Amino acid sequence: MTTTSVTPAPAARSAAGRVKALVVLCVMQLMIILDGTVVTVALPTIQSDLGFSQAGLAWVMNSYLIAFAGLLLLAGRIGDLLGSKRVFLAGLGLFTAASLLCGVATSAEVLIAGRFLQGVGGALASAVILGMIVGLFPAPGEQARAMGVYSFTSASGASIGLILGGVITQTVGWHWAFLINVPIGLASLAFAVRLLAGERGLGLGRGADVLGAVLVTGGLSLAVYTIVQTAEPHAELVRTLVLAVVSVLLLAAFVLRQARSANPLLSLHIFRRRQVTVANVVVVLLFAAGFGFQFTTALYVQRVLGYDSLTTGLAFLPAPLMNAVMSLSIAPRLTVRFGPRTMLIAGLTAFLAALLWISQAPVDGSYVVHVAPVLAVMGAGIGLAIPAAIMLAMSGAEPGDAGLASGLNNTAQQAGAAVGTAVLATLAASTTASRLGEGAGDALALRDGYGAAWLAAAGFVFAGLVLAATSLRTARK
């Protein structure tokens, strides 16, 4: 079983045509990543307009991330069966239509439904992009360059989303954070139909593990819902425990299903490779901290420091700038010299320092002292850590498991982002509510809530740092 279908590019295909196809694929990947974070700085406005509760607000992001994470494995398998171009076009079309639904939403329920459908479309498209790039650029040198473009698009998309979200929200309104995808998506569809090479899949007769997809999506979704609803005023301990048990049972049933299925979504033999397992756990922790950090920091800058949406978005500029410098220029050379494990440890250490730094930010914090340096250090740390973690996860797998390892790593990223956002947003909301109950002022209560979330994120990164230092090695091929 693989999670991406690789199609050899026709020998006669022009270099210009392949570059144009790469642009189409990377534009879709950028839209997918952007929409994971583009609404973050618009959340206070969305909350006011649509009546979200503080804890329920996280579902604007989580409904997207959960659908994306839960369906990636199934989407990759469908790409194998039906052909990657068909699945990519279906995903791009659904994503564009769902963006329109989000853009015209007038209630919390419609927005969450639209975000979920965006996640479904994003999963369908994203699951096959990597394999299509490999097919377009089979030669090692050109493939490395193409992968560099793809990796930078993925790594920088989240921070760019925060900046773009601020600009859009302040100038034309939060609805356009979604509506802007419609013309871009339609144009991408037109180019994709013409530029991407079609291929025949394995055929539906080879089977897709629909039951496995239902179990993992249901289990993960319910787990995140269980976390989020604990911060609601009506939350009850017994109900929370029941939901937690059901989510664990669903995920356990998924594991049993994969062990027995003839065509599993996730072949469990890959976990026999310790490096693959540990590296993916580090990826989960890294993305949990990273997405949760961006979510809570954007709210701190707006709600505590009093920045508007545009200024908040621009305030995040140090992160993608440092990420670009590190991931495109410095990190590759350092990795060749010192190895990915050393770079992972260095990146995690920098990220940990940034989280501890901002956790001490006061109510009257200064952007120059408490935010900008943190974002710069975080961007540099992420620029080192993410490529290194992915490299270790992929190099630890057997060559025949490359597609499976890629799909597992992609799922680890999205699951970590979804669960991390839920945990940190819920912790921030519950801490704030507790401090308000003790008589603290609004600004101080909010700051203490975000401070607790940042310390929890630091705990995630510290756990990843310990694992990287004690259980990983630079694999030899």
Image (cartoon, rainbow, N blue to C red):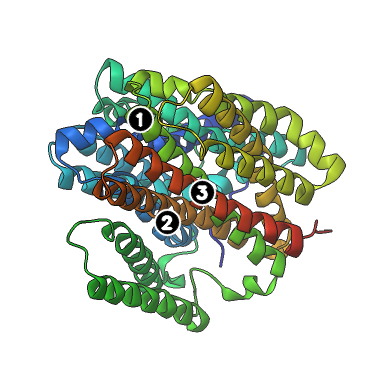
Q: Quadrant of the N terminus?
A: bottom right
Q: Position of residue 182 (x, y in %)?
A: 29, 29
Distance Cα–Cα, label 1 vs label 3: 18 Å
Residue pictured at 51% horizontal, 48% vertical: 455
Q: Position of residue 162 (x, y in %)?
A: 42, 29
Nearer the N terminus, badge 2 or badge 3? 2
**Label number found at residue 304:** 1
Q: Residue at point 32% right, 46% down?
A: 432
Q: Which callout, 1 or 3, points at the residue further toward the start of the chain?
A: 1
Give the percent coordinates (x, y) of residue 449. Answer: 38, 45
Above or below, 245 relative to 440: below
State how far apart marks 2 and 3 are (Cα).
Answer: 16 Å
The three-letter code of the residue at mark 1 reads Val
Of 180 and 374, nearer the camera is 374
Callout 2 crowding tier (Cα within 10 Å): few <14, some 14–19, many ≥20: many
The reply to whether residue 346 is in sight is yes
Q: Give the residue displayed 83% in from the left and 41% down from the top.
A: 336
If you read the primary sequence from the N terminus, does the residue marked by circle 2 or circle 1 appear first?
Answer: 1
Q: Residue furthest front?
A: 439
As drawn, the label of residue 455 is: 3
Task: Say left or right for 47 vs 268.
Answer: left
Q: Which residue position holds label 2?
A: 419
Q: Quadrant of the C terminus?
A: bottom right
Say whether marks 1 and 3 touch (CB < 8 Å): no
Mark 3, other Cα within 10 Å: few <14 / some 14–19 / many ≥20: many
At 12% across and 36% down in the image, what residue appears? Answer: 106
Q: Residue furthest right?
A: 337
- Between 105 and 19, the one nearer to me in the picture: 105
